[in-house]
Image (cartoon, grey):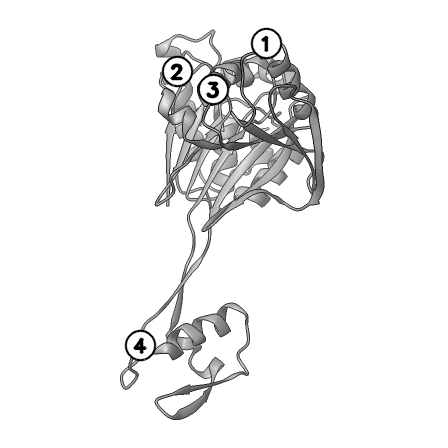
């Protein structure tokens, strides 16, 4: 369902591209410099999901904006408290006397807490805030077949992590004596709405729907997480385990090596073994360490990744509290 690419090199500021099977658009997570992000990928982006607006996560927004101007599309921008004014100020710092109305439209969704989202629209040439609505939801974005949920983590500022969730699919395996027909779709609908006491007719025979539910199998939708800068604290780890447990794939920040744990604590970042341990404790199937401090060379980053992987394979009896 999801095809995810890290578009930044190890020595560049972080940017991740998510593509969705059978969808025409891309989804960008964080706006690091990312020279591998193409013009076409920027133009085909439907939503930009920003964890926080420290410069290494927001510096390339202007380049993406530059490539999207003229597409005539509405692009969604999601981010933490303050993102509305920050996006508006970045855009209004340029001269727009030659731009045409309808060249682009941005719907900015500001995540104010773990359930409250404020929306505004910004349009050329004046880029004034047109108030939208306040949404109470744990989803910040939704399209056919999938949605994006969020969790607000602490990084001495709000840092939003994102979870791409594909819809679960129900399939039916017909038992001997049953032939396919319209009743199959009806049975699936009753199963999805938990209406087992409804009567359904199959080839002239009436059944309670729940008596046929044994033929239905649920295929769990793929889940992909992006967890950027966060302090290695018990509260953040509790939130991560709650939101990202048993994910298929998670990209998680590993800004520091274990030897630099003091820098991590001082700057409210995670570090290699801690990021690896929280992925293990969350039973994540595939965990990818990303977003390394630019003070490290390639050999040091390789060591950092080894520390991450070692924590992922550590004896399961060692809890995250022991690692702290």
Name the secondary structure under disc 4.
Answer: loop
Q: Nearer the viewer, mark 4 or mark 3?
A: 3
Mark 4 or mark 2: name the one nearer the start of the chain: 2
Element assignment for label 3: helix
Instruction: Kindly report the distance in space between the C-alpha atoms of the residues bearing marks 1 and 3.
Output: 14 Å
Number of other residues with Cα within 10 Å of mark 2, as a class: few under 14, some 14 to 19, many 20 or more: some
Residue that appears at 48% across and 80% down: 210
User: Looking at the image, which is closer to me, 306 or 140?
Assistant: 140
* Secondary element type, mark 1: loop
- Residue 304 - label: none
- For the residues labelled 4 and 3, the Cα–Cα distance comes to 49 Å
Query: Compared with residue 62, is residue 6 higher up or lower down, i.e. above or below?
Result: below
Q: Give the residue at x 60% y 16%.
A: 91
Tell me whether the residue at label 4 lies in contact with that at label 3, contact meaning CB atoms closer than 8 angstroms.
Answer: no
Comes first in the chain, label 4 or label 3: 3
Q: Identify the disc placed on residue 10.
A: 2
Q: Which residue is mark 1?
A: 94
Q: Are marks 1 and 3 in contact (CB under 8 Å)?
A: no
- Give the foreground label among 2 and 3: 3
Q: Which residue is mark 3?
A: 64
Label 1 or label 3, whichever lies nearer to me, is 1
Q: Quadrant of residue 111?
A: top right
Residue 71 image offset from top left, x and y in percent: 45, 27
Q: Position of residue 19 (x, y in %)?
A: 38, 36
The earlier-in-sequence mark between 1 and 3 is: 3
Of the two numbered discs 1 and 2 on the same chain, state the one appearing first in sequence: 2
Between the C-alphas of marks 1 and 2, the distance is: 31 Å
Label 4, on which residue?
A: 174
């Amino acid at each position: 369902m999801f095809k995810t690419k890290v578009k930044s090199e190890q020595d560049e500021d972080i940017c991740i591209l998510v593509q969705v099977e059978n969808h025409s658009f891309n989804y960008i997570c964080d706006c690091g410099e990312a020279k591998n992000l193409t013009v076409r990928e920027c133009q085909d982006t439907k939503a930009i999901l920003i964890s926080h607006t420290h410069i290494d996560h927001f510096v390339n927004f202007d380049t993406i904006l530059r490539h999207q101007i003229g597409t005539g599309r509405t692009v969604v921008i999601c981010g933490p408290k303050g993102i509305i004014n920050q996006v508006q100020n970045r855009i209004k710092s340029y001269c727009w006397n030659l731009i045409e109305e309808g060249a682009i439209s941005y719907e900015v969704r500001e995540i104010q807490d773990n359930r409250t989202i404020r929306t505004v629209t910004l349009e050329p040439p004046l880029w004034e805030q047109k108030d939208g609505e306040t949404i109470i939801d744990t989803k910040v974005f939704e399209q056919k077949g999938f949605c994006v949920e969020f969790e607000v983590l602490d990084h001495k500022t709000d840092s939003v992590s994102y979870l791409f969730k594909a819809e679960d699919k129900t399939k039916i395996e017909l038992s001997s004596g049953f032939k396919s027909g319209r009743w199959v779709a009806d049975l699936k609908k009753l199963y999805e709405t938990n209406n087992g006491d409804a009567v359904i007719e199959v080839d002239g025979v009436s059944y309670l729907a729940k008596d046929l539910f044994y033929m239905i199998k649920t295929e769990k939708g793929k889940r992909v997480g992006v967890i950027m800068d966060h302090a290695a604290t018990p509260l953040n780890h509790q939130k991560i385990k709650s939101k990202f447990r048993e994910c298929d794939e998670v990209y998680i920040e590993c800004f520091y090596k274990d030897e630099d744990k003091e820098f991590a604590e001082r700057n409210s970042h995670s570090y290699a073994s801690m990021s690896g341990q929280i992925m293990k404790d969350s039973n994540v199937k595939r965990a990818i360490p990303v977003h390394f401090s630019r003070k490290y060379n390639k050999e040091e980053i390789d060591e950092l990744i080894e520390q991450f992987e070692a924590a992922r394979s550590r004896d399961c009896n060692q809890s995250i509290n022991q690692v702290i």
